[in-house]
Image (cartoon, helix red, strand yellow):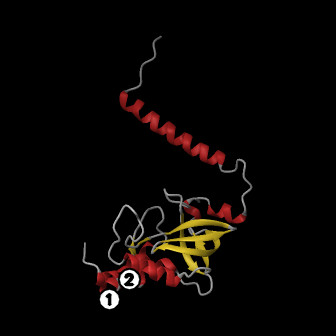
Amino acid sequence: MKATPLPRRVRLLVIPITLIVGFLLSNVLSDDAGETPTATTSALRAGTPEQAGAEAGMAEVVRVVDGDTIVVRIDGQEEKVRLIGINTPESVDPRKPVECFGKDASKHAAELLPEGTAVRLVRDVEARDRYQRLLAYVYRADDGLFVNLAQVTDGFAEPATYPPNVAHVDEFAAAARTARDRNIGLWAACPAS
């Protein structure tokens, strides 16, 4: 008896589905292979949607890269952290010109997070972005200031929503509307694009 070949559309779907399943299984199986995670490194792993808002841990600011990216020290290791839910004008990307208010946004972030500042990092659904930066909501440890929100409230950033990391999307949108209505920060300095 001769086997009937699968229709072309089904054959085209089998390959990507097989690759995705293989990738997911390899990540699950390799997550625990050969490493002894600390409490902090375990918390930095990507969580499930039910774990959104899970603690990522305490850290110390090493430096501010730009208005939405910082470098922190966690358990003696330096990590680049991308502030979730916001975007500031470019100021350091070698492939792009410095954008209107980019240097101001970086300076404001540095004022909020001077070197040595203790911060609490809280993740959303995904632990890292495609550049392997930690994704976090950043809070100053001493007074609880929500730095991501402060950048938007003070007019130095605008909301940037990348599902599934959406825990504070409504707060960021409301803060941006207020900053725009008050015509402060980048809303006053930069022509509308």
Frontmost residue, 72 versus 2:
72
Residue situated furthest right in the rendering: 36
Residue 169 placement: quadrant: bottom left
**Residue drawn where x is 32% and y is 89% of the image:** 182
Frontmost residue, 16 versus 109:
109
Q: How many residues crowd around disc 2 within 10 Å: few (fewer than 14), some, or many (20 or more)? A: many
Q: At which x and y percent is residue 55?
A: 62, 70
Give amino acid for label 2: Gly
Is 161 drawn above or below residue 132 in the view shown?
Answer: below
Give amino acid for label 1: Arg
Residue 143 placement: quadrant: bottom right
Q: At which x and y percent is residue 22?
A: 56, 40
Is residue 29 rendered to the left or right of residue 9?
right
Q: CA distance from mark 2 to mark 1?
A: 9 Å
Q: At which x and y percent is residue 181?
A: 30, 86
Badge 2 element: loop
Residue situated furthest front in the rendering: 94
Badge 1 element: helix
Q: At which x and y percent is residue 127?
A: 56, 61
**Residue drawn where x is 67% and y is 61% of the image:** 42
Q: Nearer the viewer, mark 2 or mark 1?
A: 2
Task: Write down the residue under mark 1.
Answer: 182
Task: Write down the residue under mark 2.
Answer: 155
**Residue drawn where x is 44% and y is 77% of the image:** 106
Is 150 drawn above or below residue 74 in the view shown?
Answer: below
Q: How many residues crowd around disc 1 within 10 Å: few (fewer than 14), some, or many (20 or more)? A: few
Q: Residue 21: which numbered mark, if any?
A: none
Is residue 98 rendered to the left or right of residue 30?
left
**Residue drawn where x is 48% and y is 39% of the image:** 17
Q: Quadrant of the C terminus?
A: bottom left
| Callouts 2 and 1 close, C-beta under 8 Å | yes
The mark that comes first in sequence, 2 or 1, is 2
